Image (cartoon, helix red, strand yellow):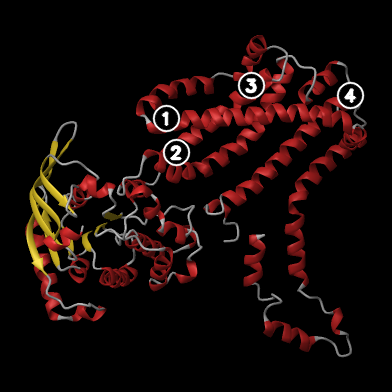
């Protein structure tokens, strides 16, 4: 979008250039009606169209090649069904996929928020106390170094066959990026602004609300982008290893063990769709909340 | 505060000493500094790096502790002056909050510690009027990252004045600006100051800046940090850019420069 505007403004063929359009006018063969004149030079139209279409190119290419490959080689659907067949299957079973999506989304969302709340609380204490910071960091490193997915069976023993083992796996997944980013955001504040606020005897509380927390927002959003994906991963892993009768992780596992290939791939497609939609939603929220931040200045 | 004005001194330091204790050494940052700044006076503090001029400012502002001596600001201790919002601090960087618009940034100091809202803090419309006089009328609802460095520094100056505190402390606020912008900012500051008659202590590295702005220039030496020379600036006010051609101005600059040379030698 921005590329387009920049090139458009500097383009001598731009339709906003009055001299140029006057010259075009003069060159038009006599007797030709004005409507046949293109509103913009064709080169620019093509460019504008290309930029609009660009996001779809990669996707179309991947799925197109996949479809072609399957049709051309005749590979058996059990090995790799064509995307058209998977899509048809998903569209034919909306109730089934909605039911299981709802379960997975609940687990992921609860895990996301639980991980976020825990991380923000811990990071707040860390940002205010060197002692808490120094004593907490080894625990975080330990968590970071452990493949926490192996905790899923433990959570199953503790909480039983319900939503909580899956929520907890997702929460542990989200906790780590959230806590590191939140801590950095709360701690790495502008020294001048901090001194300025101290010069009128601001309380710690005021400095937290008016300086630390807003300063950490870009950090929280960038970790939220990572954590959206991780929350889904955590929920699915929980469903696969912490005993479940529902959710897209479960439908995928059942699809594999019972050779229901369409169901296996359908679950994958729906999970991908949920991830994409969640990311788009987050990007929209971010654009609103971080209006002041340089990351949002796409028009420059 | 009123009683201070009557007494004539807004800031008084008597025998103030301050040490920085490092792991292996200790630095005598301030060595029994005496200072009287009258209410409504503009004092510039200049000196080589590490002479303690910023420390002096922070001692007056109650932002760092000191070991001995007494400091009196607006008739009370620095800590109490800070609590009652009698002090306005302008840091070296604009230190604007990037998530606040210009309008909301200048309001910040008034909002903070609000139970102690200084009685003289400017109203919303007065703050906007001040922003308009510094040429930011069209940018009231802009975010800081939409402004140039000079514009950000103007917001920072206005923010200091909006608090309405009688004593203003400025720590090299123009040091990051290019020379042309910087010179403009000096006269802009003088204009704002003339409207409000605040007491200002202004730390700077620039000799012309110190002379253009101040009623008095204090030259500091380092190790130990102390005031070694006081230059009273007799230039008439209001001062305009033409004073920089005035022989008297050049003479002041020469004398401050010589004092600095002796200190650095």
Q: Would you call the spot at circle 1 few (<14 residues within 10 Å), some (14-19), or many (20 or more)?
A: many
Residue denoted by label 3? A169
Q: Would you call the spot at circle 3 few (<14 residues within 10 Å), some (14-19), or many (20 or more)?
A: many
Q: Would you call the spot at circle 4 few (<14 residues within 10 Å), some (14-19), or many (20 or more)?
A: few
Indicate the secondary structure of the residue bearing disc 2.
helix
Q: Quadrant location of the N terminus of chain A?
A: bottom right
Dividing the picture into quadrants, the one containing residue B127 is bottom left
Indicate the secondary structure of the residue bearing disc 4.
loop
Mark in the foreground, 1 or 4: 1
Residue denoted by label 2? A186
Q: Residue at x 31, y 68 (%)?
A: B182
Q: Which chain carries label 1?
A: A
The one nearer the camera, A93 or A55, is A93
Kindly check if marks 2 and 1 are in contact, taking CB atoms under 8 A apart as contact.
yes
Residue denoted by label 1? A126
Residue A32 visible in the picture: yes
Mark found first going from the N terminus, 4 or 2:
4
Indicate the secondary structure of the residue bearing disc 1.
helix
Indicate the secondary structure of the residue bearing disc 3.
helix
Q: Mark 4 lies on which chain?
A: A
- Label of residue A78 in the image: 4
Q: Residue at x 73, y 82 (%)?
A: A21
Distance from Cα at disc 1 to Cα at disc 4: 52 Å
């Amino acid at each position: 979008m921005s590329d387009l505007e920049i090139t458009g403004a500097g383009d001598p063929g731009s339709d906003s250039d009055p001299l140029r359009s006057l010259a075009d006018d003069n060159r038009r063969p006599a007797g030709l009606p004005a409507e046949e004149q293109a509103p913009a030079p064709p080169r620019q139209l093509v460019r504008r169209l290309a930029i609009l279409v660009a996001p779809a190119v990669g996707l179309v290419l991947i799925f197109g090649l996949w479809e072609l490959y399957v049709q051309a080689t005749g590979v058996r659907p059990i090995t790799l069904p064509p995307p058209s067949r998977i899509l048809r299957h998903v569209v034919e079973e909306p109730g089934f996929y909605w039911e299981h999506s709802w379960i997975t989304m609940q687990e992921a969302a609860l895990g996301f928020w639980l991980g976020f709340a825990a991380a923000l609380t811990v990071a707040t204490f860390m940002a205010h106390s060197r002692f808490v910071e120094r004593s907490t960091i080894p625990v975080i490193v330990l968590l970071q170094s452990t493949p926490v997915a192996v905790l899923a069976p433990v959570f199953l023993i503790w909480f039983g066959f319900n939503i909580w083992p899956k929520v907890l796996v997702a929460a542990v997944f989200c906790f780590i990026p959230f806590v590191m980013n939140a801590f950095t955001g709360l701690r790495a504040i502008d020294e001048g602004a901090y001194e300025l606020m101290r010069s009128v005897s601001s309380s710690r509380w005021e400095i937290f609300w008016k300086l630390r927390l807003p300063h950490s927002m870009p950090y929280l959003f960038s970790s939220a982008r990572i954590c959206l994906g991780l929350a889904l991963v955590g929920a699915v892993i929980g469903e696969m290893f912490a005993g479940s009768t529902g959710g897209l992780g479960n439908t995928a596992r059942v699809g594999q063990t019972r050779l229901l290939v369409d169901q296996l791939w359908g679950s994958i497609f729906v999970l991908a769709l949920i991830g994409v939609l969640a990311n788009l939603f987050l990007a929209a929220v971010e654009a609103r909340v971080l209006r002041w931040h340089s990351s949002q200045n796409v028009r420059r | 505060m009123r009683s201070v004005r009557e007494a004539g001194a807004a800031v008084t330091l008597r025998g103030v000493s301050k040490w920085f204790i490092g792991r292996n050494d200790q630095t005598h940052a301030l060595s029994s500094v005496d200072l009287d700044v009258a209410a409504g006076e503009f004092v510039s503090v200049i000196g080589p790096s590490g002479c303690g001029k910023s420390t002096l400012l922070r001692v007056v502002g109650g932002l760092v502790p000191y070991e001995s001596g007494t400091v009196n600001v607006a008739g009370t201790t620095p800590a109490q002056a800070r609590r009652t919002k009698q002090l306005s601090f302008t840091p070296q960087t604009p230190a604007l909050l990037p998530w606040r618009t210009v309008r909301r940034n200048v309001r910040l100091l008034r909002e903070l510690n609000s139970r102690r809202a200084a009685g003289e803090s400017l109203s919303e419309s007065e703050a906007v009027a001040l922003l308009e006089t510094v040429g930011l009328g069209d940018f009231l609802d802009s975010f800081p990252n939409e402004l140039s460095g000079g514009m950000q520094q103007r917001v920072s100056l206005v923010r200091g004045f909006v608090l309405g505190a009688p004593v203003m402390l400025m720590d090299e606020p123009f040091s990051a600006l290019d020379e042309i912008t910087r010179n403009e900012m000096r006269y802009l500051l003088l204009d704002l100051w003339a409207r409000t008659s605040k007491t200002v202590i202004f730390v700077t590295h620039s000799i012309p800046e110190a002379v253009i702005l101040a009623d008095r220039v204090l030259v500091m030496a380092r190790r130990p940090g102390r005031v070694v020379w006081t230059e009273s600036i007799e230039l008439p006010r209001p001062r305009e850019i033409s004073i920089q051609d005035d022989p008297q101005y050049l003479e002041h600059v020469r004398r401050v420069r010589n004092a600095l040379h002796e200190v650095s030698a």
